Image (tube, coloured by chain):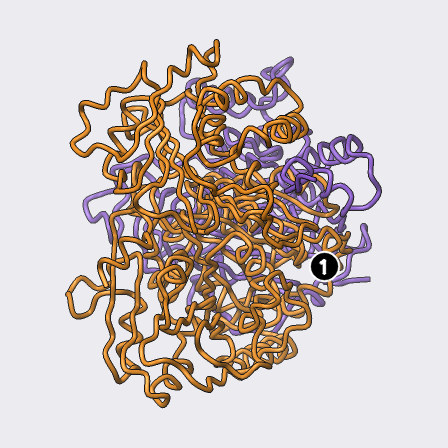
Chain colours: A orange, B purple
Amino acid sequence: MSKTILFVGSASQGIKTITDTFPSIPLSLGMHVSSSQFYESSPRKGAMGGDVVIDGDCQNYYADFLVALSQEGLLYTQSRIGGNTVLVYDSKEVNLDVLPKKPKKAVGLDLKHISKSNFTNTAAMGATLKLLGVNSADKSRLEMLLEKKYKGDVSEVIKGFDAVDFEVSDVLDFKNKREIVFRDLYYLMGNEAAVYGVLAAGANFFAGYPITPSSEAMHSWSEIYQLVDQAGFVQGSSEEHAVGVMLGANVAGGKAWTATSGPGLDRMLEQINWAAASKTPFVIYNVQRGGPSTGLATLTQASDLFSAVYGGHGDHPIIVLTPSTAQETYEIMNLAFKLAWSYSIGVIVNSSKEVAQRKNVVQIDARNFYEKKFDLAKTCRGHRTGSACGENGLPSNKAAVYWLNDRFRRFEEDYDSLSMAEFTNISVDDKWSPYSRRDLPYSMFKNVKFEPAVIKSAPEEVYICYGETAPVVKKVLGKKGLVALRSVYPYPVSIIKQLNNLNVKKVYVPENNRGVRVHEERGQLANKVRQYFKGDVVAFNKWDGFPMYPDSLEDCL
Amino acid sequence: MIEDKDLVREAPETWCAGGGKVCGYFNFRKQFLSALSEYMNKYDLSKDDVIGISGIGCSGRFTVWQDLVTVHTTHGNAPNLAQGVALMREINKKKGLVYVVSGDGDAIAIGRSNFENLCHSNADVTYLILNNGIYAMTSGQTAPTTGQGLKTISAPYGNLEEPWDVVSLAIGSGATFVARVSSYPKESKLLRGILYEAFEHKGTSVVEVISACPTQNPLNKGKNLLQLEKEYMGGSLDIKFFDEYLFSGISSNLRYAIAKDYAKSKLGKDVLLKGRMHKVEKKSYSQLLCEQKKNVKESYGEEKLSDRIKKLLNGKKVELLQ
């Protein structure tokens, strides 16, 4: 029973703080929680919004609870008031008369009066907790928890809690804790998880240029690299500069990566072909966003599949991976390094704003972090034995050419097995890649041997999706099958061909992009699926910058 | 003991030679190898410790003939790559030398912002700009260093813009060693000396090497090397000339600007200044980075990386209410 709580207000009302702190309560009760700031103030007259989803990785379009601290915030979010929405609002700040559609239940509180201070946000947090079903008997435990967590004055939260004298639902149940492994669990943004993922893989250099919504990766790395021997960091003066420095570090034998977003990826593409020609491995963490300029920067999209696969001049091999949660970002960034350095190839990880800036529970085993002593001579064997890009774009030294070509041969051999996916309601030969086994949800890629997927049976209707849409589709799946791709390139041709032989009639491909603009050709991945799948292919595309929502996806299909 | 010929690798020659047209790059290569082998012997460097990076154009071919670790990069990207390589090696405390050979178009046009970034970071890179005043490999279009009024294939009625002053640009961007010299045989001693000094300098050292292009540069066309050399020697002046009476108490980064101004106003003719223009000691980005890291690590106090990371992650841990 997934619940979506939206906190809206204006800049400096503490929306970000409350969105970050609220989840710790349900988390400590053993619930699966995620949260994100779904829009920022600058392009919206100061209106800000954050969401907290209890029991889920994606928000519903219609909020279960809408907490409004200011009129602007409410006006920007009014369309998300649905049939079951409970509206909690600051009665001194918000006037409900302007709403065309009144919510089923509205709780007006004079938050300034209740909190006896300007901290209306924390008072609202207390009120919301009460409405969610933390009952008075549990109050003392709540106080204990808050004090332990924040080590400060939490009286406003309790005042807000006391101001509500009735209970609405029983979402937060102290008695029925969900079974969840609590060892090494951290509440992290996808961007932060990416940094820990690469660190576990032995990354020691980052050169990047800040760009929303990937910047947190740089923020996080600039703190962490200080603790790692032999690790470095450069904030470049442009994406061209950053990607060049990153490739330079890799040529010298380092393990470097960069984080960027769609517009930044475009600026980096020039170097990608050089890297491919000289067989310099690299990892680019690309957080996709809508449109090219300010404003849409704070919205999500999944439109960089084509540019990641085909971008650049000339042809080049590449691997494109797509995580759909923070946990997967951690694992996939780790895997990206292993793939890049074992095949001497470039790997682009296409995350998106909705995944990268959503906070989620991530399991990180600190034992994965140990000082790796680098021997530059070993890690850049190909380059040290000859010109990295001499005659015809290949290393001029024969031994180096052999060494690098051997790696590329292995890439060609493993090509089919690199279509990684998580299968739901589809039976797959068990020995296959780690993602077919969800009983190991927090598996690190230790000693992974990739084998091509062998699908045994599948229902008549199957979803094929990737990235941020995967958790959404899971909510509406029913008895249909799901292939949630973790790697989009190599294209999942081997999987699609097997679906053809298994009596699958219809394939749905929901994507947060437009693809080729002609209607019949819509959807970037859907285009490729149409090429190989013999039955019906139904593409569902959305490109307004907002994520897909389970409730709206159900309506559309 | 490394000799000049040990540093050469067999590869097809592409620079112009013969028929009276001799590319100025040949003498530069000779002096470069001589200075480099001396430097390698002095500091006991193996061939794997010297990394050569080149960009595009005729000068981009330079590294192809070097039997060292060499990287031939794309348009204007050599400075970025050099910065990454130098930084990675400095953090890992590798001894050795990173040099870039780049043309004037590569460094001052397409890769100018990258060149400035490199100078600004003061990474330990020796950056050699072979300035022939023209886009030679692409058949003689106007370059950023082409003189004003010169007729080129892409400016048939004369070039409108003033040429870029490479030395001023490098000093302004923060390079800590800047010199200008030519590749004419008469100036070989100066060239070799400056190259050696540039190799020894810790930090970004930029050397602009004025070079003849008898094939494409309209100023050089149809003339043999001796003629060109004579013209150059007559029109250039070592900055040392001003040392005696001009530079007492003047900071290094103004030295070139004052000498340039003085030469134009007092000597009454256009004089190309040459020699070592600028040299200061400054910490590089990587030195500052390593110092900062040392302090931060000490503040964490733990021995193992995993413990330090745990400490960092502490505030984000999910804890179950008992």
Q: Chain of mark 1?
A: A
Question: Where A449 falls versus B266 (above or below)?
Answer: below
Residue A205 location (% of width, % of height): 62, 49
| Tag 1: amino acid | Leu
Left or right for B136, reference B167:
left
What is the quadrant of the C terminus of chain A in the image?
bottom left
Residue B177 location (% of width, % of height): 62, 35
SS of the residue under disc 1: helix
Pick whichever, A258 or A115, lies toward us. A115
Residue A348 location (% of width, % of height): 47, 60
Give the residue at mark 1: A376
Pick whichever, A326 or B130, lies toward us. A326
Q: Residue furthest bottom?
A: A501
Q: Residues within 10 Å of mark 1 (few under 14, many from 20)?
A: some
Pick whichever, A100 or A383, lies toward us. A100
Pick whichever, A446 or A279, lies toward us. A446
Left or right for B246, reference A213:
right
Residue at x 82% of width, y 39% of height = B302
Question: Where B275 falls versus A372 (above or below)?
Answer: above
Q: Which quadrant would residue A521 be assigned to in this image? A: bottom left
Residue at x 76% of width, y 31% of height = B295
Residue B123 location (% of width, % of height): 63, 41
